[in-house]
Each structure stands twice: as C-alpha cells, then as structure tokens.
Amino acid sequence: MKRIRQFACALLLVVAVVSLAAEVFAPANYATQFRDELPNAGPSRHHWLGTDDLGRDRFSRVLYGTRVSLLLAPTAALLSTFLAALIGTLAGYLGGTWEKLAMAGADLFLSLPWLFLLLMVRAMLPLNVSAFTSVTVTFLLLGLLGWAASARVVCTGARAIRNSDFVLLARASGVSRARLLMRHVLPNLKPVLLAQFWISIPVFILSEANLGILGLGVAEPLPSWGSLLRELESFANFSNEYWRLVPLVLLVITVTSFQLILSRDEVAA
Amino acid sequence: MIRKFISHRWIAVVVLLSSLAFAQGGELHFCLKSEPKTFNPVLVADDSSEVVRYLTGGVLVRVNRQTQQLEPELATSWKVSDAGRTITFKLREGLYFSDGTPFSADDVAFTVKQLMDPNVHSVTADVFRSGTGAVQTKILGPDRVTVTFPAAVAGIDKLFDQVAIMSAKSPKKEMAVLGPFYIADYKPGSYVYLRKNGNYWKKDAQGHKLPLLDAVKLDIQPNRDIELMRFKRGELDLINALDSDYFDKLASAAPNEVRDAGPSLDSEQMWFNEVPTAPIPDYKKAWFQSQNFRQAISMSINRADLCRIVFAGHAQPAVGPTSPANHFWFNSKLRAYPFDQQDALNHLALAGFKLQDGVLRDSGGHAVEFSIVTNSSSKPRERMATMIQQDLRTIGIKVNVVVLDFPSLIERIGEKFNYEAALLGLINTELDPNVQMNLWLSSAENHQWNPNQKTPATAWEADVDKLMRLQASTADPKKRKAAWDRVQEIVYEQQPFIYLVNKNALSAVSPNLANAQPVVLRPQTYWNIDELYVRNGGDKAGK
C-alpha cells in the first residue's frame, strides 16, 4: 500500500511539475491557431497529440489545461474545506440550536441545483473579464458552494469530540471554550479535514469538467481539462483517434492518485 | 412449343412487372429531432410538426424546391389581382381527402377562416397579416374561390405553399388530408407512422399513381449520435440535415451516402449593440455606431478560414441577408467582404483609431476591447468566435468570448441589452424577403442591433424602412426585386449585421433510397417525397 501511495505521489508530482513548466515543455502557445495545417490533424513530429478543431496544438493545450485545473482545484478545495471546518466545527462543538441551524443550512445547500446556480451566477458576471479571471471565479464559486457535504462530516466529528471524556475533563478543569476549540477539538479534527480536502480536489476537477462540457467553464482560448474533454462529447469525433483520449486518461490518473495518497486513517475518518 | 414459349414470356413479364411494383414501394425511415407539438396544420410552429405537415398536407400551390418556381397542386391555376390584395384559385376537380370526403372550394374557405382566426394564433398566418380588417373568402363555384386580404400581401401566391387544406366536412377533421400520406399511428416519444394515401391525386409522367412509397416511419430521436449510428447500421434511409463534423466522418466511410447541396438559406452573423440606452460605456457605443468601425471588423474576419476550419469547407462566405442559394432575390452584384486587415486599419484610422504597440486605441486613448456573446449549445459558433478573436488580435483588438446558456443570452440581447457584440444564426425557411420585415423595419422587435425604434435612428435605417414598405406594398416582382436589391446594398455598406457564412445543406441518403435529389431548400432530402421509393422494399437491418 505504501508503494502504491509513493507511486501516486510521484505521478502527481510529475504531472504538476510538467504542467507548471508548460512554457518549457509546450511546443506552441495554447491559443495559436495553425490554420494552414489541417485542424483535427493526427499526431506528428510538430504536434505530438495532433491539433484540435481550430488547429491548436493539443499537447500544449493539455499541459496548460492541466496547470489550470491542478492549480485551481486545490484552491477551491481549500476554500470549501475552510468553510466546512468553520461551520462544521462550530456547529458540532456548540450543538443544540446552532447545530440544527447549521445543518439545516447545509441541507439547503445540498438540495440546491448547483448546475443551475452556477449557470445563473456565470450569466450575471461582467462580460469583459479575462479568461483567467473567468476560470478563477468559476473555481471560487465551486469552492464557496461545495462546503455543505464536508461540513456535515466535520460536524459529526466535532460532536463526537465534544462528548469525549478528555474534553469533559478539560471543561471540568476550567479550560475556556475558545481554548478548548483551538487546542483540543480542531487538532483532533485534522485527519477529517485533510480527508475532506483531498476528496474535494477531484470533485472540483470533475465539476469544472462538467461545466466545460456544457460550454460554460473556462472561457476561450484558455484550456482546462473541462474544455479539453468537450472534444469527447460526440463519439463520432474520436472513433479511431485514441490520442484524443489523453485529457481523459490524465484526469482519471490524477483523480485516482489523489484517492490513493489518502492514508488508511484518513479514509477511515 | 410456340404457345409454351409465349406463355413463358408472359409469365416472365408478369413476374418482372410485379417485382417492379414491389421495388417501387417500401417504407421510408428517418428521424424527427423532437416530439411533434401538433398535427393540426394551422397550428404548426415547430420543425417536427412541419415535417408531418409537409408529408401529409395537400396545398393549393407548391414551390418546387429544385427550380424554386411555383407549381400548381390542388389549384390548377391562380390569379393575383387588386394590386396583391386578392388571389383567385381554380381548383382541381374530383379529388378526395384520405377518408373519402370530397374536396371543394368550401374546404379552401374553411382552411383560410381557420388560419386567419385571431384566436388560433397561427404562426403560418403571420405572413398573411397585411393590415387591419378581416380576410374575405368568396366561393365562386365548387372549383373556384377568391381570397381577399385587407391590404396587399407581398408574394401572396408563394405563401400558400405553407397552407395545408383541411376538410370542412370530414368527421376526422384535420386528420383527413389531401397529401401523399396520412397519419396511421402515433406513439408519443417513439414514432409517427404515415401510410400511403390511396386517394392522393398525383400521378407520375407514366401515369402511375403516386406516392411510390407505401409508408413513412418517423422515429422521434433527439440524439444526433444515435441517429448517425442507426443510419450507419442501415436502420434509417436518410438524415435530412447533417453537421459538417458528422458529414465528414460519414463521407470517409461511405462517400456515396453523403450529399452536399451547396450553400443553404441559413446564415451566421455577428452584430454590435447600438442601443442608445444600453448599459455600456459611451465610448464603446461610439465605436459600435461607427460605420468605419463595423466595416473594419468585417474586413478583418477571415471568412474563408471560418468556412474551411469550422465547417470543414461545407460553407460559403456570406454576403448579406439573402443567400446566393436564393436564385431570384439574391443581389448578384455583391461579393463577400474581402479579408484585408490593412484596409481595415485604414478604415479604423478614418474613424480616429490608432494602432500603438500592438494595441488599437480610439481617439480618447481607450484600448479597443469588447466581448462577443454566443450560445453554449452551438460548438460552431463558439469556434467562430474564437477564430474571430485571433483575427482581431492581429489588428490590436482584444475580444473576450463569452458563452452563455440560451435563456441568459436572450435576456441580455433582447431585454436588458447588456452586451457588446453577439454571434448567432438565422434560419431562413422562406425565399421571399417579405418574411424579414420583422428584422429590417427599425420599429421591429427583431431589429437586433437597435430594436423598437420610435423613429429611425439613422438616415440609412429610414431608407431601409421605406424600401421594405415599398416591396411589401407592391405586387410587381421587378419593383420588389429592385427595392430588396437596394436594401441588400445598404446593409452591405453599413454592416449592421456582419454576415459570416452560409452553411451548406448537408444530408445523408442511403443507396437504397431511389430518386433522392437533395436540394438547399427545406425539406432538403424528401422535397420530392411522391417520387421516392426504397429499392429493397424498406427491409431494414435490425427491423
């Protein structure tokens, strides 16, 4: 198991380094349209993964797209985990009405149709924003909206800690609420929060990919895994052209690697 | 011996004739993209219902989709009089509806009454609404009827191509038809089954009764991938409209099964928001209202590349509101704007723009940047916008491509006017420019760049208003053509719509389907449904 984790870590590291150094490895700019060459061309010496439907180098776009998705998905995961920690810990620790209110809020968020909400928010954004701003806003929105499921888990964990003997002992010894929270409850929730963080990353990558498939993710010409996966919308587009599956394979490898690097304790948590 | 030989020959002839009779029949299979909303011909407003109306409805006159000329159908002749207000039809005698009810002038009067009933809200009737007042029908005899409109209706005779005659007396109401097929079965969400109308009046040149097909099965299938897969498996005989991606994939596997009929009437275009009250900065409004700016943008777009890359060569650079496919109404003096970015910069300089360090700036020093909105469900439009983005970058303009879901897009461009430029398409089903009145009149709701004007905002829009009203109020085709030609010239000069491409009419036809001659007008592949037949009798794989 340890070997597999190490392998997954190494794989993620390679993917991250190569995508972060996209300028070095990419043979072309992700936006350059090689119009004189055929669009949708197959792999060649100049275009290792061929070109997309506008004649852009697919390998370069995969590298830059990986960078976008791999940088922003953890940011969104961090945001959602922070919100989940804040709301879940307070709700679980304070209990009673606070817990009921927080969990009702979480239920409300879970019952919201995310997709339509994201479409609505995206439609309300100003039109003249750069592609990078647009993708950042998309991921931040995903992070802001994605706290509810994690908060429920964190709340359960915090409640269990609140009712534990050592917390009871600490309270009996006159430890203040704030100190109890910061010194005893939060540190014991660390495995839960880490697990939620790691689990959220692939969820956000997939969410952006789903938005991308609907044409509502990252604005052109900036690539992301979502926009790259749009090529696979129709089976007619990739029959016998297996190099088009590279973004999908990369997504599967990355998501699987994220799952594999979770320790057994974290999974249990 | 001789008698035996003769009798063998007769047997052979009989076998041959019967095999021919069998061959000229069969069941045609193709797909509807959605559920038909109605089978009542006057209520038709969606594509699927229109398909059923075309296959089942008998009309007084029909525009031949190949020659684009009007031909007699239920009416043997017709005469337009009273400066385009009145049309008199002489009807074919001895015809019957599919249920055996006789056809007469009463049925024409009944249909017109149903069609023009304001409570029915018929979309088909919109093109006939020429003024206030009722439409009068006068039955001059069992085979003669006159229809008089309150005001002149431009191209009145051709408009009757869309009017399927209903029976005034049949107990089956709109299900009794005069067309080649009648609706025999309908399973919602699954199929519409049409059977040959035994009372259909038409015969071919050899005197054989038409239609040649025995039945048509219309499968309801919204998924284009599944439609293509079923066509490849031989379960469908045709795909009426194909995307260029699918066309090329199919062409590489079976080149004899795809047909490119050339540029269609449909166009793709972009335009700038010129609404004075739009919530965009004033300096941007000034750009968009500048003729030189719009012309420069038009010249900077490489239309040939759009056709070649986005539509895989199955499109033509567009010229204006009328496609070259429209033989009579297209102004053949006009050519698509040439791709000339140096000339574009000259035009921009005339309007006070300067290219500085690779950035185009207006006279106030503002960097030229705008967004193009388009709908998320159209990949070709998104691709076109991305290509325009690169084209305009080379003259220092930054373009942001924004893809929105359709309701949000419509809200922005039609209600709040909160956008800068839009890229959308126009589906033209009619040849006559009169149907574009709601687009070109400055007071019209669909005058996209600046709708609902109380008085024309510019002198050229006032000219277009006058010319559109002139062509609508005269019955003389030459005068109408001259007026529409001038409208096309003004639009070409002013570029309120920057026409990009006319997509080609692409279709797929099984080698088993005989007599198919796809054309650019809708319905492209089965416009001559009477004459089509399936060679092996419609024995589908997997049926």
Image: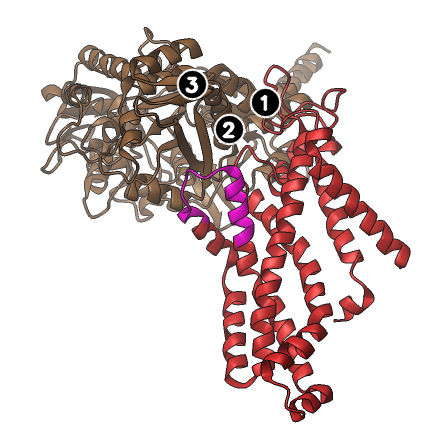
The residue under the point 51% across, 30% down is B380
Q: Main secondary structure of the magenta part?
A: helix
Q: Colour of chain A?
A: red
The residue under the point 76% across, 57% down is A259
Q: Are marks 2 and 1 on the same chain?
A: no
Which residue range is magenta in the image?
A122-140
Q: Pinpoint residue A204: horizontal percent, then vertical percent.
A: 62, 53
Q: CA distance from mark 3 to mark 2?
A: 23 Å
Residue nearest the observer in this picture, B531 or B394:
B394
Chain under numbered label 3: B
Q: Is residue A20 visible?
A: yes
Residue nearest the observer in this picture, B323 or B345:
B345
Chain colored brown: B
Of the 4 image quadrants, the one containing the C terminus of chain B is: top right
Q: Are marks 3 and 2 on the same chain?
A: yes
Can you tell which mark lies on residue B356? 3
Of the 4 image quadrants, the one containing the N terminus of chain B is: top right
Q: Quadrant of the rendered structure where residue B118 is?
A: top left
Can you tell which mark lies on residue B143? none
Q: Quadrant of the rendered structure where residue B397 is?
A: top left
What's under tag 1, amino acid-wise? Gln
Pointer 2 with pointer 1, Cβ within 8 A: yes
Secondary structure category for the residue under label 3: strand
